[in-house]
Amino acid sequence: MHLLFRTLFLLLRSGRRSKLSLWDISSWPTRVWPTDIDLAMHINNGMYFSLMDLGRFDLMRRSGVWKRMRELKWNPVVAAETISFRKSVKLFQRYTVESRIIGVDSRAVYFEQRMVVDGEIYARAYIATRFIDEKGPVSIERIMAEFGPVPAGRELPDWLHGWREANSLPSARRPARHLWSA
C-alpha cells in the first residue's frame, strides 16, 4: 500500500509515454523520495524491489501487456528475486529504473532490472515472475500464445537456471516444513 498512489500515477503516466514492444527496454525516470529511504538517507534495501515493481509495470503498460492481462484476469507475481548493490542512491537523487525481459523457462518469465544514475549501474536485480489467474499459475505456453514467442538470442544464461533451482521452495501444493535442522 505504501506505493499505491505512486503506482497509480505511474500507470496513468506510462499510458501517455511512447509505446514499446514487450521485448524492448523500459526506462522509467524518477527520483528518490523521503518515503524511499532509511536512516542512512539512501534507498532502503527492501525498497529497491518495490521500485523495480514499478519499472516492470511501466514496461507492461507501455507494451500493451498490462491491458491484456487485466482482460484475462491475470496477475503478475514474483517467484524469486536477487539483487546486487554497487552504490547508494540517495535522497532526492534522480535515477532511472531500466527493465527488460531476458527470457523464459518452463515456469517463469525473467527480468533484468537496473537502477541507473548518470549512465552508471548502481544496483542490478534478476526477477523470476509468474502470471496467475483464479485457477492458479498460467502456463508459459499460454503466455507465449498470448504475447508471442521469445525473440532469438534471449536464451537464459546457465547460472540463472542454477540460481532458480538453488533458491526454489516446494510447490504450494506440497508441504514445506518450517523446522530448522541443526
Image: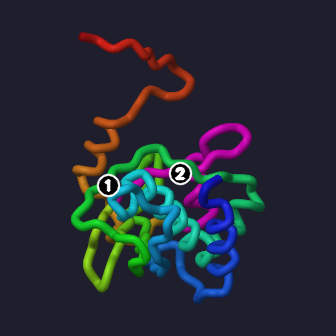
At horizontal 68% and vertical 66% (from top left) the residue drawn is: 5
Residue 83 image label: 1
At horizontal 33% and vertical 59% (from top left) the residue drawn is: 40
User: How dense is the environment of label 1, judged by Cα within 10 Å: few (below 14), some, or many (20 and up)?
Assistant: some
At horizontal 63% and vertical 46% (from top left) the residue drawn is: 132
At horizontal 69% and vertical 68% (from top left) the residue drawn is: 8
Of 126 and 108, which appears nearest the observer?
126
In primary-sequence order, the first of circles 1 and 2 is 1
Q: Which residues are magenta?
A: 125-148
Q: In the rendered image, which quarter is residue 48 located in?
A: bottom left
Residue 60 highlighted magenta (yes or no): no
Task: Tell me the amino acid under the disc marked 2.
Answer: Ile
Judged left or right of residue 42, residue 4 is: right
SS assignment at label 2: helix
Task: Please state the horizontal and vertical placement of residue 61, each as a whole percent of the image.
Answer: 63, 73
Q: Is residue 42 above or below residue 118?
A: above
Of 161 and 182, which appears nearest the observer?
182
